[in-house]
Amino acid sequence: MNGRYAYATDSAGLMHEGLARLSALLAVEGLEVARVVAAPDRASRILALAAGAMLSLPVAVWTPGERPEGLF
């Protein structure tokens, strides 16, 4: 597709690189995260599970009305 409303998406490699950079940033800043919180859609759950695996954190699915603490 092309034009003003072209479809754009990140590749698996770019998502992996972003999660690796996030992991390094958390380590450098000394920040601790209790868990990864995923939005209820399928794509968000997949990325949250990957983030949880890379960061060795549990993953919880967010539901509307809830105010969980964690990395979204």
Image (cartoon, rainbow, N blue to C red):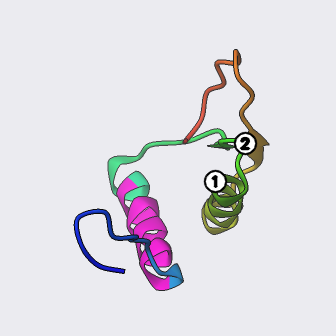
Position of residue 44 relative to residue 67, above or below, is: below
The residue lying at 76 percent from left, 49 percent from top is 58
Vertical position of residue 14 compared to residue 45: above or below: below
Magenta segment boundaries in residue numbering:
13-25
- 14 displayed left or right of 66: left
Would you place residue 68 above or below residue 58 in this image?
A: above
Tell how many labels. Answer: 2
Name which residue lies at 46% across and 62% down.
23
- The spot of residue 4 in percent (x, y) is 23, 64
Split into 4 quadrants, where in the image is the N terminus? bottom left
Along the viewing direction, whichever of 11 and 53 lies nearer the viewer = 11
Which residue is at the far bottom? Answer: 13
Q: Quadrant of the C terminus?
A: top right
Q: Residue 10: image x %, image y %?
A: 43, 74
For the residue labelled by badge 1, is the local secondary structure a helix, a strand or a loop? helix
Q: CB of mark 2 within 8 Å of CB of mark 1?
A: yes
Quadrant of res 47: bottom right
Residue bearing the label numbered 2: 40
Residue at label 1? 44
The structure residue drawn at horizontal position 40% and vertical position 70%, both measured from the top left corner, is 7
Query: Is residue 61 or residue 33 the one in the foreground?
Result: 61
Residue at point 31%, 63% (across, down): 5
Disc 1 crowd rating (10 Å Cα; few below 14, some 14-19, many 20+) is: some
Could you tell me which secondary element the residue under label 2 belongs to?
loop
Separation of residues labelled 2 and 1 (CA atoms): 7 Å
| Outermost residue, left side | 4
Quarter occupied by residue 53: bottom right
- The answer to whether residue 10 is magenta is no
Image coordinates of residue 63 in percent, x first then y, are 75, 28
Question: Which labelled disc corresponds to residue 1?
Answer: none
Kind of residue indicated by mark 2: Pro
